[in-house]
Amino acid sequence: MKITIYGPDGCSNCSQLAETTRNVVEEHGFDADVEKESDTATLAAKGIMSTPGFEIDDEMVLSGSTPSEQEIKELIEERL
């Protein structure tokens, strides 16, 4: 599973979401790679108008909000 967090450098919510997602993956033993993408051209190409963007296996699952640890866990489990 590939999880990508989209948000520009300097976006504290985006960085926090990436860190929280890494923690959830580690705590629950999910087989997933978590990446943070900050390139603005990539964000535009993905149609992300409000950050952070949260993508699992090339499917944008949410944008513009910061989910809780429980919500992140549920989003991952839904796609296992």
Image (spheres, helix red, strand yellow):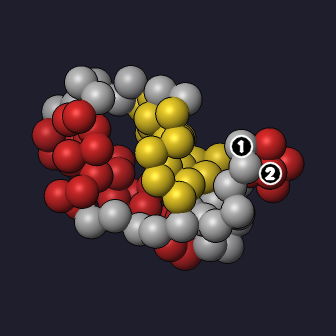
Q: What residue appears at the point 67 percent right and 73 percent down from the top-left corner?
A: 10
Q: Which quadrant would residue 75 be assigned to in this image?
A: top left
For residue 70, which numbered disc appears in the image?
none
Which quadrant holds the C terminus? top left
Q: Position of residue 56 (x, y in %)?
A: 44, 35
Q: Which quadrant would residue 34 be assigned to in this image?
A: top left
Position of residue 76 in the picture relative to residue 7 (left or right) = left
Position of residue 44 in the picture relative to residue 18 (left or right) = right
**Residue in front for this viewpoint, 10 or 47:** 47
Is residue 46 in view from this perspective?
yes
Q: Position of residue 24 (x, y in %)?
A: 24, 49
Amino acid identity at mark 2:
Ala
For residue 44, which numbered disc appears in the image?
2
Q: What residue appears at the point 18 percent right and 58 percent down from the top-left corner?
A: 70
Q: Around disc 2, counting alpha carbons within 10 Å, would you say few (fewer than 14), some (14 to 19), or many (20 or more)? A: few
The reply to whether dot 1 and dot 2 touch (C-beta < 8 Å) is: yes
The residue that label 1 is drawn on is: 46
Which quadrant holds the N terminus? top left
In the picture as drawn, the residue positioned furthest to the left comes out as: 28
Q: Is residue 3 above or below residue 51?
A: above
Q: What residue appears at the point 35 percent right and 51 percent down from the top-left corner?
A: 21
Total labels drawn: 2
What is the secondary structure assignment of the residue under circle 1? loop
What is the secondary structure assignment of the residue under circle 2? helix
Is residue 23 in view from this perspective?
no
**Gap in angstroms between the C-alphas marked 1 and 2:** 5 Å
